[in-house]
Amino acid sequence: MSREEAQGVIKAVLDVLTRSYETARAFACAVHKASYPGRDLMELAFEDLCSRFDLYLRRLQSQGDRQRGLIILDESAHETTLQEMARNFRTLGTQWRVIRNLADTPLFVDSRASRVVQLADHIAYAVFRRYNAHDAQYFDIVAPKIDSADGVIHGLAHKQTVDSNCMCIACLSRRSS
């Protein structure tokens, strides 16, 4: 497959999200590694994502929609840790608040057997390319589906401590709100 063909395949996969249900939302967390020395970056991102997803579900509840959320992840060496963290979020809370809207602990599946997890992998790649390689061609496809409300992009976090004037859409939307 040529480079252009491979890029076309990635874009076609990401377009599945764009063409999906009007209510479909994406969540992502980009972490600048050097900003958090000694921290487990997977745990940092997972806490952030769980909190953002819970906030989204809280907003739905305030509009009368009482559905609860389910987090499905690719199989990982972090499975036990992340399940324990999710249980603690429901009882002890995150650094922000107790998570009340997850229906169960995260489920882990083999991404080769789940098209939804494969789509999530592509979304993660799009975010990675945007923040690591400054290549927004994939990110721009999924950006409209990232959770937002009242002019603030809630579904995307850019965790970094090096640039207080970062101009990415996540940082910019929080500064302008």
Image (spheres, rainbow, N blue to C red):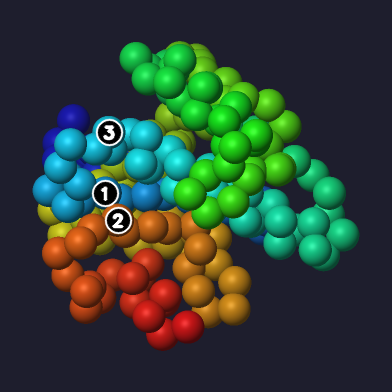
Return the residue at label 3.
40
The residue type indicated by label 2 comes to Lys
The residue shown at (47%, 83%) is 177
Query: For the residues marked 1 and 3, what is the alpha-carbon distance in whole angstroms?
Result: 11 Å
Q: Secondary structure at mark 1?
A: strand
Return the residue at label 1.
31
Q: Nearer the viewer, mark 2 or mark 3?
A: 3
User: Residue 112: which quarter of the image?
Assistant: top left
Q: Are marks 2 and 1 in contact (CB under 8 Å)?
A: yes
Whether residue 36 sits left or right of residue 118 in the image: it is left
Please tell me whether residue 66 is drawn above or below residue 147 in the rendered image.
above
Residue 114 visible in the displayed image: no
Whether residue 134 sits left or right of residue 143 in the image: it is left
Q: Work out whether residue 65 or residue 3 is closer to the camera in this orientation and state it.
A: 65
Residue 31 visible in the displayed image: yes
Q: Secondary structure at mark 3?
A: loop
Q: Counting residues from the N terminus, which is met first, the one under dot 1 or under dot 3?
A: 1
The residue type indicated by label 1 comes to Val
The residue shown at (59%, 78%) is 150
Q: Residues within 10 Å of mark 2 (few under 14, many from 20)?
A: some
